[in-house]
Image (cartoon, rainbow, N blue to C red):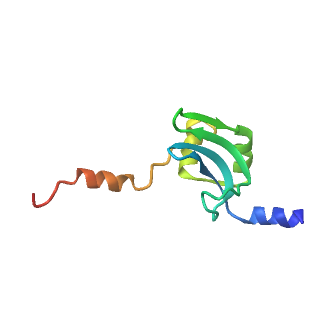
Amino acid sequence: MTRLFLFTILTTMLIIRLQRVGRKNDPNFRMVVVEKKRAPKSGASLETVGSYNPKTKKVQLKNDRIKHWLMKGVQLSDTAHNMLVKAKIIEAPKINKAGGAKNSEVLTKPAEGV
């Protein structure tokens, strides 16, 4: 039984990402290791490796567990990657937000026909 469980975990794509928890208008985030296909709000995570409170800007990370999962080949979401770069757990350049160029083009484009 445990061999089948471990085989299932090792053959699925895993990702470290932020999972929103907390009340309405009071967000808190957990940094969790989950299957990539799983819905973001589903509570089924393999391990919680950190937390982030955006109101107080407090970040708590389990460095040894994050490094353990990265050695096993777990991928990172863009936001989790940038948080780990800022905390100096990994050495890499930060990843730009997706769609950032589109928004700036729309805002700086002059209105036509006015």
Residue shown at 54%/48% (left/top)? 79
Residue 100 vs 82, above or below: the answer is below
Give left or right: position of 9 versus 76: right
State whether residue 68 appears in this view: yes
Q: Is residue 92 visible?
A: no
For the point 70% across and 38% down, the residue is 63
Residue placed most toward the observer, 106 or 86 = 106
Residue 83 is situated, as x and y percent measured from the top left of the image, at 56, 41
User: Which quadrant: the N terminus?
Assistant: bottom right
Give coordinates of residue 37: x percent, y percent. 63, 65
Q: From the viewer's perspective, is 55 left or right of 36?
A: left
4 relative to 62 in the view: left or right:
right
Q: Residue furthest front?
A: 24
**Residue 2 picture quarter:** bottom right
Considering depth in this image, is 12 or 31 the residue closer to the camera?
A: 31
The residue that appears at 68% across and 63% down in the rendered structure is 13
Residue furthest out toward the right: 1
Give the quarter of the figure containing the C terminus. bottom left
Judge left or right: residue 97 versus residue 82. left
Q: Depth check: 96 or 20 in front?
A: 20
Q: Please provide percent x and percent y for residue 29.
A: 59, 45
Q: Position of residue 15 (x, y in %)?
A: 65, 56
Q: Residue at x 35, y 53 (%)?
A: 101
